[in-house]
Image (cartoon, rainbow, N blue to C red):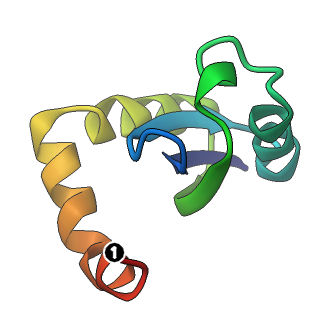
């Protein structure tokens, strides 16, 4: 299994979208500052993830979630979470 995930930076309030085979390890790497693209945006909350059967599907899903329509999907999908956590 592969996972497509979305993190929320508690520092700047922006999202980071990625994919991984080991979600727990990857989240810990983000939190410890071991990921170059996010090390200055810590700490994070894991706010969304999806399981995919293979890496190809996870990459496609990651790319989709980074598009305008993907961001609209996430906004709608996470509407209740954002309302509860603001």
* Residue 18: image location, x then y, percent: 54, 33
Quick check: 82 above or below 51? below
Q: Indicate the quadrant containing the C terminus: top left, top right, bottom left or bottom right.
A: bottom left
Quick check: 19 above or below 44? above
Mark 1: few, some, or many residues within 10 Å (few <14, many ≥20)?
A: few
Left-right relation of 10 to 69: right
Q: Nearer the viewer, residue 30 or 65?
A: 30
Name, please, the residue furthest toward the top. 36
Quick check: 63 above or below 25? above
Left-right relation of 69 to 47: left
Q: Nearer the viewer, residue 35 or 58?
A: 35
Q: Tell me what residue is drawn at x 38 percent, y 80 percent.
A: 81
Left-right relation of 21 to 69: right
Q: Tell me what residue is drawn at x 79 percent, y 40 percent.
A: 31
Quick check: 72 above or below 63? below
* Residue 28: image location, x then y, percent: 85, 43
* Residue 52: image location, x then y, percent: 57, 51
* Residue 75: image location, x then y, percent: 21, 62
Q: Which residue is mark 1?
A: 82
Left-right relation of 44 to 81: right
């Amino acid at each position: 299994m592969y996972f497509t995930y979305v993190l929320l930076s508690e520092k700047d309030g922006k999202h980071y979208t990625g994919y991984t085979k080991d979600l727990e390890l990857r989240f810990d790497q983000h939190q410890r500052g071991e990921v170059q693209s996010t090390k200055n945006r810590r700490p994070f909350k894991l706010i969304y993830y999806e399981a995919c059967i293979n890496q190809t599907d996870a990459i496609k899903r990651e790319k989709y979630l980074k598009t305008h329509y993907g961001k609209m999907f996430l906004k709608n999908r996470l509407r209740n979470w954002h309302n509860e956590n603001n």
